[in-house]
Amino acid sequence: MEPAGLFEWTQEYELGIEIIDRQHKDLINVLNDVYSAIYEGDNIEKKLPELLNALEFYISEHMDLEENYAEKYNFPKANELIESHNFFKTTYSELRYYYYEKPEISHPTIQKILHLHSIMHKWLRFHLKTLDKELCEFLKEKLEE
């Protein structure tokens, strides 16, 4: 069993659409880097902007890609997929807000970072095994036609 906080990519997360799998792996790597930085004593101030930039890409490019596929091919759970993505976006926005827009309050404490990291980590594990898996199975049939 992997340590709490780390996310090991396994075959169960492989969805079979190369660009989507690659982007998921990239996000997992960034989340693991941030977790490691906290526990290995690295300067989290260096890692947090990396996480925010990766999440910005994930939100703007990756989620848009999935949502566009879902709409283009009439994925029956498109609305559920978008709602799920919106939950992740809200968590991201909270971290970004405290880090960039309210520095006078203070940068997020390690506890806030770990809390938000944990939410993102758990969300991604669940999302990959449910909605993303269903979307990719649905798309494989559509893309082969």
Image (cartoon, rainbow, N blue to C red):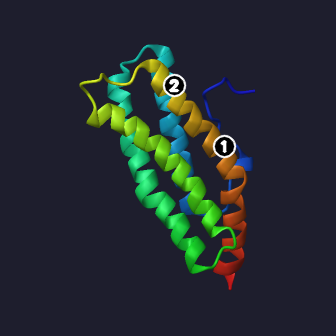
The residue depicted at 52 percent of the width and 54 percent of the height is 86
Label 1 vs label 2, nearer the camera: 2
Q: Amino acid at mark 1?
A: Arg
Left or right: residue 44 compared with residue 102:
right
Which element carries disc 1, helix, strand or loop?
helix
Snapshot quadrant of residue 83: bottom right
Q: x%, y% of residue 56?
A: 39, 49
The residue depicted at 67 percent of the width and 23 percent of the height is 3
Which element carries disc 2, helix, strand or loop?
helix
Of residues 56 and 95, the one drawn nearer to the viewer in this rendering: 95
Q: Amino acid at mark 2?
A: Leu
Q: Which mark is residue 28?
A: none
The residue depicted at 46 percent of the width and 29 percent of the height is 34
**Residue beneath disc 1:** 125
Of residues 40 and 122, the one drawn nearer to the viewer in this rendering: 122
Left or right: residue 47 compared with residue 119:
left
Quadrant assignment for the N terminus: top right
Q: Is residue 21 visible?
A: no
Relative to 10, say whether 46 is above or below.
above
Relative to 55, say whether 138 is above or below.
below
Relative to 26, say whether 99 is above or below.
above
Q: x%, y% of residue 61?
A: 43, 60
Of residues 141 and 126, the one drawn nearer to the viewer in this rendering: 126
Q: x%, y% of residue 116?
A: 51, 32
**Residue beneath disc 2:** 114
Quadrant assignment for the C terminus: bottom right
Q: Residues within 10 Å of mark 2 (few under 14, many from 20)?
A: some
**Could you tell which of marks 1 and 2 lies nearer the N-terminus?**
2
